[in-house]
Image (cartoon, helix red, strand yellow):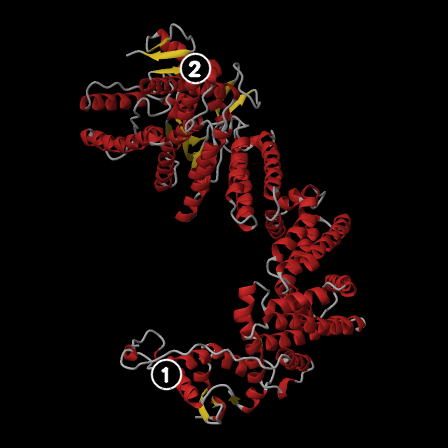
């Protein structure tokens, strides 16, 4: 995994998730962050901090990114979501435009 | 969610992040405003996208969308005002460059702003029906920069000035031009059209109006067209380089209108270089150019076509009515063919094989060929000439080509039956004198005539060929049954079916005794093998070979002569001198034929086997003839042709004409009866049109003649007039 192909996502608690850019761009918001023409701090350092997203949720989100890449096209698998995460996850999804 | 039942799960009410700080909105907006400033100042690298996005997200979420939106408009507007000032300040050529640079900056900034305000674009704008950020940016640019009073006209003038400079041959920065024009297009097609395209077209029209005026005064037609074509291509090229592709049609329309449509007639009729001169000089390139250019404007092609047609008709008319030309029918037809070839190649080389032009060509030929009543005769004579000698040493394909061309002329003829008459005569002469070069060519032409006009047209011609074949067999049979005649076949008889051949009834002459005995033998043989037939000799159509010894030197020659000439010559076996009267009495040849045959033997240099007193060109009734003892010739065999008027003389022409008219009568009647049989009742005018239509493939029926035929049919009780409406005819049967 080359460094320029990855992006580091940092949770409110400071946990770091290093994932593929390709996966991260499932989120429209992250895609804009990384592709916007001006050089924002995120593009330069290859890391994005989410002070409003908890580690648990961010982990779930990263899982979803990979799941989405693999199965989104009509594969009949379910993405398991624990009910207690549902609400926060939905808010995050709205934020990330996923 | 299958596990919902297992656990007792309660959804908490959504907790709005309560805004404790009443200045929250202002604070957040300040951050964003600052960011926008930084973006415009190329200072974005220190900004955190996430932070800005989150702030904008929260503002929208906390119902400060409107504040955010208005703030954006105000900030952007103020930046654009600054930009506008710096563009206005740019001098001369740098104006466009500055404009282009700022436009690129603005575009980039706009995209960044849109990205960080994406959440607003997604949720707030659709619900309040406001303009999305990107479009808003373009609109603000348009209103503050392009439509600012100091820039709008300056931009327009600069662009038009650049185009004008390029038209006059200068090199301009096409890349910059393309970018600016692209900017106008990005701002909306109406901006492009109003701010650039419309004035551009007006200026272009003005420019080309002036230029075309200048050109037409000093250039000839060919040069003018070259220039027009070049301009047209330049404009098309210009469009591909830096204009909207939709402008192509508009600008080419302008050029077409100003340079071609407005000067069309003047160009076509230009003295010494107009269309007619191009046609005369076979200027394929110029003609092709004219075709392509005129093709683009309304009525362009029809103008060319009309001029070509009238020119063609005029020259054609001169060609067919020029008395000089009428002297040599072969030359006459050859010239027609050349003319046709010329225009065919013009149409295929320059006019794109345009069907309408071909039609115009055909109708013109049809028009002028039929102006001369002798065209059918001449065409037949042309074929005759070709089939007698013209095709010697010519390959089969070339023969086909010539015959096809003749057929093409034939198609133009209205009086095809006249052609048939002549063709029959000429064919008969060819066959009987054994002059036809190629049987294949003869048959090929007949097949062509057949496909063109149907079986009826050629049945008699084919009958002639059959007769020739049967005659050969008959001759073999005759000599087989008369072995005493030996191998020397002194008599060759061709039995011609009456009706198939153009025979003249009752023209006979007294044959020499030696001959008539032989003829009698054949007659009895023929009538013995075929019953119920009558034989009569067509002495005017035969030929004979006569062995003659001249003078004391004993010069021996074999003379190839006609039957009449042979009869005359035979008389000199028993006499030294004979007067015209004596010859006439002895042979009983019709006077006109006799004179002609004597003339050919006594008055033609090199062929004068006879001499006459007094020496003169013409044969008089009082002349006396004797054998020319001093006759010499390099050849052993001498062919003495009759002085044939190859063309028909005036009275003969009248006669043929009359025969043709006579032949037409039954055809018209047959047509009338055919039509009435199916229609039962028809009025006069309709009969005339139908009959004309039916007979068109053979000849153009004369309405008065049709009327006469109808009357004759009424007399014979085929038709009757309606008792109420006298214009109506009824079929009786």
Q: Residue shown at 78%/72% (left/top)?
A: B85
Q: Which residue is mark 2?
A: B684
Q: Nearer the viewer, residue B654 or A96?
A: A96
Q: Which mark is residue A84?
A: 1
**Closest to the observer: B448 or B562?**
B448
Crowding near the residue tagged with mark 1, few <14, some 14–19, many ≥20 C-alpha atoms within 10 Å: few
Q: Nearer the viewer, residue A27 or B8?
A: B8
Q: Position of residue B162 (x, y in %)?
A: 74, 65
Left or right, residue B76 beside residue B13: right
- For residue B539, which quarter of the picture? top left
Chain letter, disc 2 residue? B
The residue lying at 75 percent from left, 52 percent from top is B206
How far across and how far down the image is residue B307, in percent? 62, 38
Mark 2: which secondary structure?
Answer: helix
The reply, left or right, for residue B91 in relation to residue B631 is right
Question: Considering the image in quadrants, where does the N terminus of chain B appear?
Answer: bottom left
Which quarter of the image is occupied by the C terminus of chain B?
top left
Q: Secondary structure at mark 1?
A: helix
Any part of residue B604 in sight = yes
- Which chain does tag 1 point to? A
**Label 2: how many residues lie within 10 Å, few (<14), some (14-19) or many (20+)?**
some
Horizontally, residue B593 falls left or right of residue B42, namely left
Q: CA distance from mark 1 to mark 2?
A: 103 Å
Q: Percent x, y for residue B224?
A: 70, 51
> Residue at image x 34%, y 79%?
A71
């Amino acid at each position: 995994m080359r460094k320029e192909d990855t992006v580091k996502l940092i949770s409110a608690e400071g946990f770091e998730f290093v994932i593929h850019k390709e996966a991260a761009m499932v989120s429209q918001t992250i895609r804009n962050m990384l592709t916007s023409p001006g050089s924002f701090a995120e593009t330069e350092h290859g890391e994005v901090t989410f002070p409003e997203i908890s580690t648990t949720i961010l982990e779930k989100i990263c899982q979803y990114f990979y799941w989405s890449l693999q199965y989104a096209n009509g594969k009949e698998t379910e993405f398991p979501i624990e009910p207690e995460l549902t609400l926060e996850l939905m808010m995050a999804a709205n934020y990330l435009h996923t | 969610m299958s596990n919902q039942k297992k656990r007792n799960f309660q959804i908490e009410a959504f907790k709005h992040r309560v805004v404790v700080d009443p200045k929250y909105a202002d604070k957040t907006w300040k951050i964003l405003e600052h960011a926008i400033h930084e973006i415009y100042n190329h200072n974005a690298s220190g900004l955190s996208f996430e932070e800005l996005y989150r702030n904008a997200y929260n503002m929208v979420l906390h119902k400060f969308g409107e504040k955010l939106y208005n703030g954006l408009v105000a900030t952007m507007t103020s930046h654009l005002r600054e930009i506008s000032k710096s563009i206005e300040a740019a001098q001369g050529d740098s104006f466009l460059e500055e404009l282009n640079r700022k436009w690129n900056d603005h575009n980039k900034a706009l995209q960044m702003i849109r990205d960080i305000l994406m959440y607003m674009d997604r949720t707030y704008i659709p619900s309040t029906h406001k303009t999305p950020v990107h479009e808003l940016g373009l609109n603000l640019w348009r209103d503050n920069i392009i439509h600012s009073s100091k820039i709008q006209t300056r931009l327009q003038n600069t662009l038009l000035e650049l185009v004008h400079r390029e038209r006059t041959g200068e090199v301009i920065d096409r890349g910059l031009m393309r970018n600016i024009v692209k900017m106008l297009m990005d701002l909306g097609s109406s901006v492009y059209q109003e701010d650039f395209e419309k004035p551009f077209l007006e200026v272009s029209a003005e420019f080309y109006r002036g230029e075309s005026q200048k050109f037409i005064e000093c250039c000839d037609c060919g040069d003018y067209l070259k220039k027009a074509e070049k301009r047209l291509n330049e404009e098309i090229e210009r469009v591909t380089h830096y204009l909207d592709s939709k402008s192509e049609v508009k600008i080419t329309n302008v050029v077409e209108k100003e340079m071609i449509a407005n000067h069309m007639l003047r160009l076509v009729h230009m003295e010494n270089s107009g269309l007619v001169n191009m046609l005369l000089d076979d200027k394929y390139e110029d003609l092709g150019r004219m075709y392509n250019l005129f093709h683009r404007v309304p009525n362009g092609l029809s103008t060319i076509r009309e001029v070509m047609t009238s020119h063609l008709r005029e020259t054609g008319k001169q060609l067919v009515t020029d008395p000089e030309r009428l002297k040599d029918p072969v030359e006459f037809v050859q010239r027609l063919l050349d003319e046709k070839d010329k225009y065919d190649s013009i149409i295929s080389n320059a006019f794109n094989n345009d069907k309408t032009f071909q039609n115009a060509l055909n109708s013109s030929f049809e028009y002028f060929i039929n102006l001369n009543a002798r065209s059918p005769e001449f065409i037949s004579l042309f074929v005759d000439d070709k089939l007698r000698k013209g095709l010697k040493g010519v390959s089969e394909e070339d023969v086909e080509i010539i015959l096809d061309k003749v057929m093409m002329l034939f198609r133009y003829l209205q009086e095809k039956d006249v052609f048939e008459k002549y063709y029959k005569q000429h064919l008969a002469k060819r066959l009987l004198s054994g002059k036809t070069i190629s049987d294949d060519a003869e048959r090929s032409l007949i097949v062509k005539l057949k496909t063109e006009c149907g079986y009826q047209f050629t049945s008699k011609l084919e009958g002639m060929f059959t007769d020739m074949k049967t005659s050969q067999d008959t001759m073999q049979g005759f000599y087989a049954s008369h072995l005493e005649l030996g191998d020397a076949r002194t008599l060759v008889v061709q039995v011609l079916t009456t009706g198939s051949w153009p025979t003249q009834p009752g023209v006979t002459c007294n044959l020499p005794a030696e001959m008539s005995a032989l003829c009698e033998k054949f007659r009895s043989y023929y009538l013995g093998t075929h019953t119920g037939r009558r034989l009569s000799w067509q002495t005017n159509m035969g030929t004979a070979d006569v062995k003659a010894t001249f003078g004391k030197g004993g010069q021996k020659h074999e003379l190839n002569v006609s039957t009449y000439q042979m009869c005359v010559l035979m008389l000199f076996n028993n006499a030294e001198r004979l007067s015209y009267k004596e010859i006439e009495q002895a042979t009983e040849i019709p006077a006109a034929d006799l004179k002609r045959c004597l003339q050919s033997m006594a008055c033609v240099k090199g062929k004068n086997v006879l001499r006459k007193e007094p020496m003169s060109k013409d044969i008089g009734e009082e002349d006396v003839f004797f054998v020319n003892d001093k006759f010499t010739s390099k050849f052993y065999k001498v062919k003495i042709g009759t002085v044939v008027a190859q063309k028909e003389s005036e009275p003969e022409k009248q006669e043929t004409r009359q025969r043709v008219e006579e032949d037409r009568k039954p055809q018209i009647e047959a047509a009338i009866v055919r039509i009435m049989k199916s229609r039962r009742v028809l009025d006069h005018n309709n009969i005339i049109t139908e009959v004309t239509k039916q007979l068109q493939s053979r000849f153009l029926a004369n309405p008065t003649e049709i009327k006469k035929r109808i009357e004759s049919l009424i007399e014979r009780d085929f038709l009757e007039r309606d008792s109420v409406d006298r214009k109506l005819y009824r079929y009786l049967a």
